[in-house]
Each structure stands twice: as structure tokens, then as C-alpha cells.
Image (spheres, helix red, strand yellow):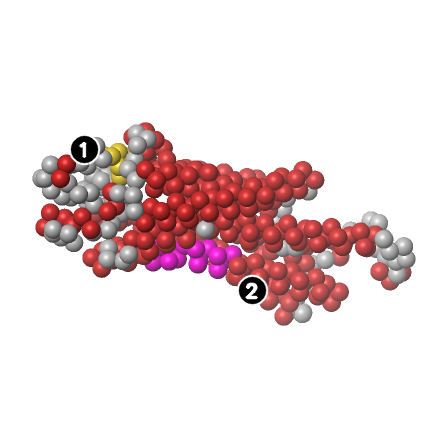
């Protein structure tokens, strides 16, 4: 791209002033006669950001707070690993909702950064912290479901494993977000000295260093979690399919539990498709745009900036979708189970053939696979 001073229409060039490699010394004309570039003025892109982020913030706040309250109530009476992880997922999404989204709204409204260098670094940290934490907690949930089905009898240190995964998710989010506090800082425009912005200019020695940092962020926040999710749930479905087809296997399900297995298999399949679909659809367009920009910057910069901003806004909807996907599937399933139990207990006559002695629990009559499927209900 030519420098702005080489073009009389440079003021009409639309780019995100927070992502430019450097601030071009646009002109030597006095400030009084200087025409600000469009992205240094309040424009349609800022209006779009304010409107969309406001809607996302309200919806995400209502959905995540509702799920968090319901999970806290359930945890008092029926603690479980999945409930604990869902609570951390809701907390991660609430951090995105109440820290990143309000910051983006205020930033779009003021255009320039007016909160000082310290807040620039702190808010840049929280701008990615919630997103990293949400992605890593998704990995924890997928790994937990993987062990629940494929290794259901490994109960030793199961609680410690859960705590360790959650701690690693939080620590990982802190570590991966910390560089934001170093590379982001406040700078003044070289000509329009009253204009301040929270930017990354002069933080990277070479464009290669910037590329490595950007690609690393994409891998940690998107590629790695997506790979873990797909591998974990694909393994779960394959295990269920393999055991149901192999009737001679000692770990295969019994005839009486085929109905339960069918429900668990269907629910797992639905949840798998939605989990992968939501995460993939929300984040893929944005990261495709990033890869395009890294590969061919000259052509990528000509894409309408409103589209580029819209892709990141769309990626943030993942924080709104998480409580819907995980909350509805798990909370509704538990409510259905509660409704079924009173019906069973209300039957005064129990067939003799279905009588289970008190010293024999239902779990002792199930195969390991059937026990593990209970965790998917």
C-alpha cells in the first residue's frame, strides 16, 4: 500500500488504526488544515461495533448468569465434575461479557484511547484473557468426557485430575494473555499530537516476530481447542459404535439397556455436532481472514473494514452460544431424569422378575460402557 502522503485521497483510506504496522507521517500541513483519516473519526464501523457489542453483552449476560445460577443450585445438592466445569465456562464467558465487550463499546465511542497507558495494558490483557479461558475450559470438558467414556473405571484421583485441568486452564489463560500487556501501549500521532491510541506499534523487531506471535495466538485459541474437541467427541462416538456392534465383547451393552444406550448415543451425537459446529462456525471466518492477511496483506487490506470488524464480532458470539449449548443439554437432561424418578417410585406393584435385592446396586449389573454412558445423560 502506498503511503498516505503519496495520495491526495489518503484521508479516505479505511483501515483499522489499531492494527497498522506504523503510523504514517501523513502530512506536514498544520493541524488546523489537516483532514483526519476516516478511522480517526467516529464512523459507521464504530456505530456497528457499539450496536452489535451492546446486543451481545445483554444476551450473553442474561444467558451466562442464568446458567451459572442454575449450576450453583444444582451443585449444592448434586455436585459433579461436569457441573463444576460448566461453571468455569460460564465465568469465562462472563469475563468476556463484562470486561472485553464494555471496553470495545467505550473504545468505539471515543475512537481514540483516553484511559492512559496503564489501563491500555491492563485492558489489553483482559481483552484476550476471557477468550483464552473459554477455549481452554472447552478443552477440559472434552477431555473429561473422553475419560468418562473411554476410561470409566479409572476413578483414582479423578477429583484431583479435574482440579488440575481447571487450574491449568486458568494459568494458561494468564500466561497466554500476559504478552498483551507488553506489546500494547499508548502512543501519540506523529503529527496530530493530541490524538492518542492504544496500539502495538514498535513492539515487534521485525514483521516475522509479529507473524509468529499472531499465529501462536491463533493456534492456542482456535486450532488446538478445535483439535481436542473433535478428537475427544469423535473417540466417544466411535467407542459407543464399536461396543454396540460387537455383541460378543464382554464390555458390550445388555439387551435391556439398548433403549438407554440409544438415548445416550443420540444425545452425545447431537451435542457433538453442535459443539464442533458452533466453535467452528464462530471462529473460522475470523481466522481465515487473519491467515489471508498474513499470506497476502496487499489484497487483504482492500476487504471492507466493516466486514473485518464483523468477523471478530461474530467470533465473540461463541461466548453467547456456550451457555445455550452446554447449559440446555445438561440442565434439561437432569430435569427430565428428575421427572422420571417420581413416576417409577409411584408404582406400588413391582414385577417379581424385575426385583433387585437391596445389596445389589444398579451399577453392579451394568457393563463398564453402560456405567460410562451414565455420565452422558
Q: Identify which residue is drawn at 33% across, 56% down.
A: 307
Which residue occupies the foreground of this view, 285 or 47?
47
- Locate residue 52, reporting x and y percent: 42, 49
Q: Earlier in the sequence, mark 2 or mark 1?
A: 1
SS class, disc 2: helix
- Residue 257 lies in the magenta stretch: no
| Region rendered in magenta | 275-288
Q: Identify which residue is drawn at 42% across, 39% down.
A: 102
SS class, disc 1: loop
Q: Identify which residue is drawn at 63% across, 70% down.
A: 245
Residue picked out by circle 2: 238
For the residues labelled 2 and 1, the Cα–Cα distance comes to 62 Å
Is the residue 269 above or below the residue 54 in the image?
below
Determine if residue 324 is in view.
Answer: yes
With 157 as the anchor, is 57 left or right in this view?
A: left
Q: Residues within 10 Å of mark 2 (few under 14, many from 20)?
A: few
With 166 as the anchor, is 305 left or right in this view?
A: left
- Locate residue 82, reporting x and y percent: 59, 47
Q: Residues within 10 Å of mark 1 (few under 14, many from 20)?
A: few
Check the image and name the residue furthest to the front: 33
- Magenta span: predominant SS is helix
**Quadrant in the rendering for residue 31:** top left
**Quadrant in the rendering for residue 87:** top right
- Residue 286 lies in the magenta stretch: yes
Residue picked out by circle 1: 193
Amino acid at each position: 500500500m502506498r503511503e498516505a502522503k503519496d495520495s491526495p485521497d489518503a484521508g479516505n483510506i479505511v483501515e483499522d488504526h489499531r492494527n497498522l504496522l506504523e503510523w504514517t507521517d501523513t502530512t506536514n500541513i498544520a493541524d488546523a488544515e489537516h483532514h483526519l483519516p476516516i478511522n480517526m473519526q467516529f464512523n459507521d464501523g464504530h456505530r456497528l461495533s457499539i450496536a452489535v457489542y451492546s446486543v451481545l453483552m445483554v444476551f450473553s449476560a442474561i444467558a451466562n448468569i442464568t446458567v451459572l445460577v442454575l449450576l450453583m443450585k444444582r451443585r449444592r445438592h448434586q455436585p459433579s465434575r461436569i457441573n463444576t466445569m460448566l461453571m468455569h465456562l460460564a465465568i469465562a464467558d462472563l469475563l468476556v461479557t463484562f470486561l472485553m465487550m464494555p471496553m470495545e463499546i467505550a473504545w468505539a465511542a471515543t475512537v481514540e484511547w483516553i484511559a492512559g497507558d496503564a489501563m491500555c495494558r491492563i485492558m489489553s490483557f483482559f481483552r484476550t484473557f476471557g477468550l483464552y479461558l473459554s477455549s481452554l475450559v472447552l478443552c477440559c470438558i472434552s477431555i473429561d468426557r473422553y475419560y468418562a467414556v473411554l476410561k470409566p473405571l479409572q476413578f483414582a484421583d479423578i477429583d484431583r485430575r479435574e482440579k488440575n485441568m481447571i487450574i491449568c486452564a486458568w494459568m494458561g489463560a494468564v500466561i497466554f494473555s500476559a504478552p498483551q500487556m507488553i506489546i500494547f501501549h499508548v502512543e501519540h500521532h506523529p503529527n496530530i499530537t493530541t490524538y492518542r491510541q492504544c496500539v502495538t506499534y514498535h513492539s515487534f523487531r521485525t514483521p516475522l516476530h509479529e507473524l509468529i506471535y499472531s499465529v501462536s495466538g491463533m493456534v492456542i485459541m482456535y486450532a488446538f481447542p478445535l483439535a481436542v474437541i473433535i478428537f475427544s467427541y469423535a473417540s466417544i462416538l466411535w467407542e459407543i459404535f464399536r461396543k454396540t456392534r460387537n455383541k460378543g465383547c464382554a464390555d458390550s451393552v445388555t439387551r435391556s439397556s439398548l433403549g438407554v444406550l440409544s438415548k445416550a448415543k443420540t444425545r452425545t451425537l447431537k451435542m457433538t455436532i453442535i459443539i464442533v459446529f458452533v466453535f467452528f462456525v464462530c471462529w473460522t471466518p475470523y481466522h481465515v481472514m487473519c491467515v489471508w492477511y498474513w499470506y497476502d496483506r496487499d489484497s487483504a487490506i482492500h476487504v471492507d473494514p466493516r466486514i473485518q470488524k464483523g468477523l471478530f464480532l461474530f467470533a465473540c458470539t461463541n461466548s453467547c452460544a456456550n451457555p445455550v449449548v452446554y447449559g440446555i443439554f445438561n440442565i434439561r437432561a437432569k430435569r427430565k431424569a428428575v421427572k422420571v424418578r417420581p413416576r417409577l417410585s409411584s408404582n406400588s406393584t413391582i414385577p417379581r422378575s424385575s426385583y433387585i435385592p437391596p445389596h445389589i446396586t444398579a451399577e453392579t449389573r451394568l457393563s463398564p460402557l453402560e456405567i460410562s454412558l451414565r455420565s452422558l445423560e
